[in-house]
Amino acid sequence: MTGAAKRLPGPEIRFDIETQANANSFMCVNCSSCDVVCPVNVGSNRLWPQKIVRLANLGLIDELITAREIWYCLRCRKCETVCPRQVKHGNIISFARAEIFRRHLISVSAIEQLRKIFYEFQYVRWHLADSCIQRKKVEATHQQWAYWADLPARSIADEIKHRPMPKGTGVFRNFFAPANLSTCQTCSECTNACPIFVDRAVFDPQLIIRMINLGFIDAALRSPSIWLCIGCQQCADACNQLVKPYLAIEWLKQMAENKGVVPFGFAHRFEIAEKSFYNLYLDKIDDILGNSFNIQ
């Protein structure tokens, strides 16, 4: 099959992809809302969810399963939450990965390496946030990555300096009332659904909820963990008690800036600093994929 013939749209293949993925891909109107909210795209400008949907819609199966973006995705599904046509981008990615496995195009060891890099990336993000809070200058180098990847993160509980006052606990519970934190049953559904959870010390929505409910607000505000939340809302979607951890964490970020716990405008500066490490993360994925099978 020639390169030109390979790239001809395939109506039948398009239908097969939609049948198996059940992604409502035909409903896409190319509005690019998904591209705007994707945390990987925001951080690197290298993952365009709309491109994945277009490949599926055109029936370009070979291009779809060899797209590097399939492995860049964090599976946070933020793209789906903003889609006005209810397209399920994550389903297309799940289909593409399954097709790769079915064709034996990637090894088990490569998958393990990809998982390891993802785990390391969350540790790197935590230490980056910690360094930014301390106003340290850092550069996105392989040496810095290796150092942070092996360096344990401090648990948010380690930030506790004193016992909470009962009165203060009640005030903060009222402040966070719209997030329904008082109904939390510590079932860990939010943790299980969180796409970036790798270690409780790095980021755990349930632990943050417990800290707020127990009144350890100052400890929560000082922790770098709150800055790792990508606001995907999967924690809220999974909670059968209608708790909204992502909302409480967003308020913690605002409080940290307003109270001067972090420098004013920290969120924006952290986002800028994080971009270079996102690109380093994707470069590491490219290296693994390039050594595993022929990625276009």
Image (tube, rainbow, N blue to C red):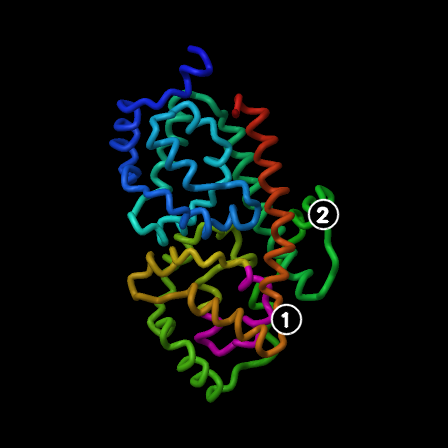
How many residues crowd mark 1 within 10 Å: few (<14), some (14–19), many (20+)? many
Using the rendered view, name the quadrant where residue 158 is placed.
bottom right
Q: Nearer the viewer, residue 35 or 175?
A: 35
Estimate the x, y position of residue 6 in percent, counting from the top left.
41, 17
Residue at left 50%, top 41%? 47
Residue at left 53%, top 29%? 109
Magenta segment range?
Answer: 210-227
Estimate the x, y position of residue 198 in percent, counting from the top left.
51, 50
Q: State whether residue 202 is above or below residue 285.
A: below
Judge from the rendering whether residue 235 lies leftward or rightward of residue 271; answer left or right. Answer: left
| Magenta segment main secondary structure | helix
Q: State whether residue 25 is above or below residue 129.
A: above
The residue at which mark 2 appears reads as 144
Judge from the rendering whether residue 215 lies leftward or rightward of residue 77; answer left or right. Answer: right
Q: Callout 2, which amino acid?
A: Gln
Label drawn at residue 262: 1
Q: Callout 1, which amino acid?
A: Val
Quarter holding the N terminus is top left
Judge from the rendering whether residue 46 lies leftward or rightward of residue 27; answer left or right. Answer: right
Q: Distance between the residues labelled 2 and 1?
A: 23 Å
